[in-house]
C-alpha cells in the first residue's frame, strides 16, 4: 500500500471535478497540495479515432451500456480525463428560474447561480453557431417546428474551431469541444495540481481515500505507478458523477447517517426517433445538436432536441428486427433524427445502491406519467418529421414499423399509449442527476447548499448528484456553477481543517 498526503483531493475530473480543480489551483502557489483522481484514461490525440464501438469502450463506463436494475433503461456516462464533458455535445444552457424555484434549496440563490453560469459560458467559449454551420438535420427540425407553430430555440455550444465532424458523443477528434479536458484541467495542472488518471476510488475513511491505479491499453501512463494507494487529505471533494459519487459514499458507510444518500435519482429518460427522407440530408456533417423545443415541457413533461447518432446506437433504438430496420439503416444518409427527453420526477424509490461487491446498481423505474410523456413526444416528433418533408417515420411504440407520410393524420392512432412496452421500446438516459441532493437537513438531503456533506467535516460533493430534482435542461453549465460554489466553500473551510 503506497501512502500519499495532500491538502485537497478531488475525485473525478468532469464538469464538477475539473471546475473545482481549476478554481482551487491558485492555492498551489501558497504550497497547498492538490490532486485529482480520475478513473478513466487521458487519451492521446491520435486515439480519438471516431470509430463508434472503439470510442464507446474507451470513453464510457461499460461501453455506454450500463443498465438499470430491471434492465429497462440504458445509462451512458463517461470515464476519461475530463469525464462526461469529453463525450457530450457541448450544449450549454443556464438553469431556468422556474426550475430553480422548484428545487427550493435553502441558502442557494438564483442570481448567484446565474452569475457563476455566465462565467463558465465565457470561459468555455459558449456561443451560437452561425446559420451557415447548421446542417440539414437541424434545419429540418427547426423548419418543421415553425410550420407547426412550436417554439424552437438554438442551442449555445462550447466549441472553438469546430470542423463539423459530427463526432461529439465519441470525443471530438479535432479538439474543438471546450470541456474540462481542454480548459479547466490543463490550467489546473499548469498551476501545480496533480492529475492521476486510471485511478479508481473505492471508499473514504476518516478523510483517507482507498484507491487503486491500473494500466490501461490506451492513453498516457498514469502519474502514479499501478498499485494500491492510501491518500489522506484535509478536504475531499467527490465529483464522480450521479452514479459513482453516491456509490463511493455508500461504500464508505455513510448511508445510515444519510438516509437520502443515493435516492431521488433522475436521468431524463430518452428515446431516439428516426425518419427517412427521399433525398440525402447530410446529417453527419456539422454539429449534431443545434436546436431544441421546450414547447411541451410544462404541460406534457418532455423536451425535444436535434441529434444524429451512429449506426450501432441507431440500430439499438429501433423496435423490431428483419427487413424493415435493415432498409432503414441502409439509408443512413437519408435519415433525420430527434432526441426526446422526459422530465422525470425525483422519487426516493429511484436510487443508486451498491451490491455485495460494492458495485453501483441503479434501481430506477419509469412512472406511468413518464411513459405517457414519452408516447406523446413520439407523436409530436412524427408531426415535426412530416412537417419537415419526411416520407416515413419510425416510432418505437408504433403499431407498425413505419408510419408513411400519407398516414400523418392518423399519428395518435398509430402511436398508441399501449404500444409503449418495456423490452420493445429502447429507453436510454440523457442526463444523470441526483443521489446526493442539496438541502437543509440530513433526514432528506446529503449536502448543504455549498456541497458540504452533512455531519462530516472536510467532505464535499460537486457534481450533478447535488441536484435535488431534474434540471429540465442540459445540466453541464449548472454543474460547473455549483462546483464553483463548492470550491469557494472549500477555500473558506480549508484553514480550519487538519488531517
Image (spheres, rainbow, N blue to C red):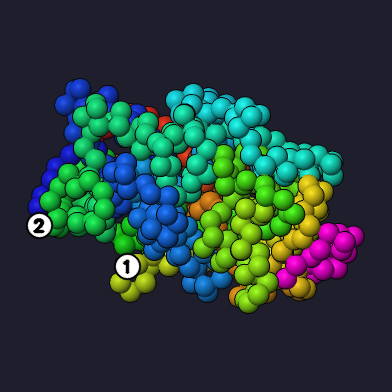
Q: Residues within 10 Å of mark 1 (few under 14, many from 20)?
A: some
From the top left corner, tell me how far across and down residue 264 is, in percent. Answer: 53, 57
Q: Residues within 10 Å of mark 2 (few under 14, many from 20)?
A: few
Q: Residue at x 62, y 70 (%)?
A: 326
Residue at the farthest front position = 279
| Image quadrant where one finds the C terminus | top left
Does any portion of residue 319 appear in the rendered image? Answer: no
Residue marked by disc 1? 358
Residue marked by disc 2? 1
From the top left corner, tell me how far across and down residue 401 is, in percent. Answer: 72, 71
Location of residue 349 (image quadrant): bottom right
Extent of the magenta region? 401-416
Q: Residue at x 66, y 54 (%)?
A: 335
Q: Does residue 148 appear to the left or right of 175 in the view shown?
A: right
Residue at the farthest left position = 2
Q: CA distance from mark 1 to mark 2?
A: 20 Å
SS of the residue under disc 1: loop
Instruction: Report the front residue among 58 and 3.
Output: 58
Residue 404: in magenta span: yes
Above or below: residue 297 compared with residue 425: above
Q: Main secondary structure of the magenta part?
A: helix
From the top left corner, tell me how far across and down residue 303 is, in percent. Answer: 68, 49
Mark 2 or mark 1, which is nearer the start of the sequence?
2
Amino acid at each position: 500500500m503506497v501512502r500519499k498526503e495532500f491538502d485537497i483531493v478531488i475525485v473525478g475530473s468532469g464538469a464538477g471535478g475539473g471546475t473545482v480543480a481549476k478554481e482551487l489551483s491558485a492555492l498551489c502557489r501558497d504550497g497547498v497540495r492538490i490532486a485529482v483522481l480520475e478513473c478513466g484514461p487521458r487519451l492521446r490525440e491520435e486515439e480519438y479515432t471516431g470509430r463508434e464501438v472503439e470510442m464507446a469502450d474507451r470513453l464510457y463506463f461499460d461501453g455506454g451500456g450500463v443498465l438499470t436494475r430491471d434492465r429497462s433503461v440504458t445509462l451512458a456516462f463517461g470515464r476519461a480525463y475530463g469525464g462526461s464533458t469529453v463525450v457530450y455535445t457541448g450544449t450549454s444552457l443556464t438553469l431556468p428560474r422556474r426550475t430553480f424555484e422548484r428545487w427550493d434549496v435553502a441558502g442557494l440563490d438564483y442570481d448567484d447561480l446565474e452569475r457563476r453560469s455566465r462565467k463558465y459560458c465565457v470561459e468555455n467559449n459558449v456561443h451560437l453557431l452561425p446559420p451557415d454551420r447548421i446542417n440539414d438535420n437541424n434545419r429540418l427540425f427547426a423548419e418543421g417546428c415553425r410550420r407547426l407553430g412550436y417554439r424552437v430555440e438554438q442551442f449555445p455550444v462550447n466549441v472553438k474551431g469546430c470542423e463539423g465532424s459530427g463526432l461529439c458523443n465519441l470525443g471530438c477528434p479535432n479538439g474543438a469541444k471546450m470541456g474540462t479536458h481542454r480548459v479547466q484541467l490543463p490550467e489546473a495542472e499548469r498551476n501545480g495540481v496533480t492529475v492521476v488518471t486510471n485511478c479508481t476510488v473505492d471508499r473514504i475513511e476518516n478523510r483517507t481515500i482507498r484507491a487503486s491505479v491500473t494500466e490501461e491499453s490506451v492513453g498516457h501512463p498514469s502519474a502514479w505507478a499501478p498499485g494500491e494507494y492510501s491518500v489522506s487529505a484535509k478536504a475531499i471533494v467527490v465529483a464522480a458523477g450521479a452514479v459513482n459519487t453516491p456509490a463511493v459514499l455508500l461504500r464508505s458507510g455513510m448511508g445510515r447517517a444519510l438516509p437520502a444518500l443515493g435516492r431521488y435519482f433522475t436521468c431524463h429518460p430518452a428515446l431516439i426517433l428516426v425518419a427517412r427522407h427521399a433525398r440525402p440530408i447530410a446529417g453527419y456533417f456539422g454539429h449534431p445538436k443545434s436546436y431544441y423545443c421546450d414547447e411541451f415541457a410544462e404541460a406534457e413533461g418532455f423536451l425535444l432536441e436535434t441529434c444524429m447518432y451512429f449506426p450501432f446506437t441507431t440500430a439499438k433504438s429501433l423496435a423490431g428486427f428483419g427487413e424493415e430496420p435493415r432498409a432503414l439503416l441502409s439509408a443512413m444518409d437519408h435519415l433525420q433524427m430527434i432526441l426526446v427527453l422526459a422530465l422525470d420526477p425525483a422519487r426516493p424509490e429511484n436510487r443508486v445502491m451498491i451490491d455485495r461487491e460494492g458495485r453501483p446498481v441503479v434501481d430506477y423505474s419509469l412512472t406511468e406519467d413518464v411513459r405517457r410523456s414519452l408516447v406523446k413526444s413520439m407523436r409530436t416528433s412524427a408531426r415535426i418529421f412530416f412537417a419537415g418533408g419526411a416520407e416515413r417515420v419510425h416510432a418505437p411504440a408504433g403499431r407498425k414499423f413505419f408510419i408513411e407520410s400519407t398516414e400523418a393524420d392518423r399519428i395518435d392512432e398509430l402511436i398508441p399509449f399501449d404500444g409503449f412496452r418495456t423490452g420493445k421500446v429502447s429507453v436510454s438516459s440523457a442526463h444523470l442527476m441526483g443521489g446526493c441532493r442539496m438541502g437543509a437537513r440530513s433526514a432528506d438531503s446529503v449536502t448543504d447548499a455549498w456541497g458540504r456533506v452533512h455531519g462530516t467535516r472536510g467532505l464535499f460533493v460537486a457534481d450533478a448528484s447535488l441536484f435535488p430534482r431534474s434540471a429540465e435542461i442540459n445540466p453541464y453549465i449548472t454543474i460547473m456553477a455549483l462546483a464553483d460554489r463548492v470550491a469557494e466553500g472549500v477555500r473558506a473551510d480549508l484553514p480550519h481543517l487538519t488531517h
